[in-house]
Image (cartoon, rainbow, N blue to C red):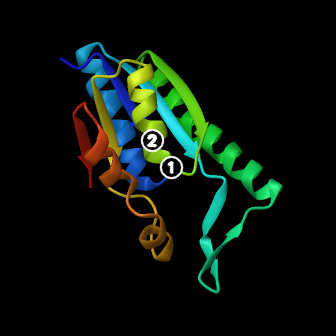
Amino acid sequence: MFKTILVPTDGSPLSDKAIEAAITFAKGAGSKVIGISVSEPRDYSHVSDGMSVSDSKQAFQDRCAIAEANVGKIAAAAQAANVPCETVTARSVNPYEEIIKAAKDHQCDVIFMASHGRKGLSALFVGSETQKVLANSTIPVLVFR
């Protein structure tokens, strides 16, 4: 049914739940997993006078390293389950666009993702990437809560 599963992660515990479910499903179905994590070039969690504060170069590099570690968790879990896996990281101010692009580029049949990752002001300011994926995806999206 689903031969290639895209699994976006932001490293949150809820994303870990989606990763676990995707790998379990892939193992049973003989599917492949594609893991993705997107680094945003600005840190929207800091707001000053109503304006977002730009990243330092080091802060962005730190988030890129975190994205690599996030997909590394997917790769390790897939390897432990003997499930084929590829990983990709991307950089974008619109993570949902990179998620949808990765699904297309890797000919994915379904996206397994968390209902949310960020909390507090950051979630309100940036908006729900999951909602944007749901609104713009042409393939099924399985959302984990």
**Label 2: element kind:** helix
User: Can you give x and y, in whole percent of width and height, for residue 110 in the image?
Assistant: 27, 29
Q: Evaluate if marks 2 and 1 touch, with contact meaning CB atoms under 8 Å apart.
A: yes
The answer to whether 54 appears left or right of 69 in the picture is right
- Above/below status of 101 relative to 31: below
Q: Residue reaching furthest bottom?
A: 49
Amino acid under disc 2: Glu
| Residue hosting label 2 | 97
Q: Residue reaching furthest left?
A: 1
| Residue at x-position 44% and y-position 68% | 123
- Above/below status of 84 relative to 104: above
The answer to whether 7 appears left or right of 31 in the picture is right
User: Can you give x and y, in whole percent of width and height, for residue 13 in the image?
Assistant: 43, 54
Q: Quadrant location of the N terminus?
A: top left
Amino acid under disc 1: Asn
Counting other residues with Cα less than 10 Å from the Cα at mark 2, is it few (<14), some (14-19), or many (20 or more)?
some
| Residue hosting label 1 | 94
Q: Which mark is residue 47?
A: none
| Residue at x-position 64% and y-position 38% | 68
Q: Quadrant location of the C terminus?
A: bottom left
**Label 1: element kind:** loop
The quadrant where residue 141 appears: top left
| Residue at x-position 50% and y-position 35% | 36
The CA distance from mark 2 to mark 1 is 6 Å
User: Can you give x and y, in whole percent of width and height, for residue 42 in the image?
Assistant: 65, 59
| Residue at x-position 53% and y-position 40% | 37
- Above/below status of 92 relative to 111: below
Counting other residues with Cα less than 10 Å from the Cα at mark 1, is it few (<14), some (14-19), or many (20 or more)?
some
User: Can you give x and y, in whole percent of width and height, for residue 44 in the image?
Assistant: 59, 67
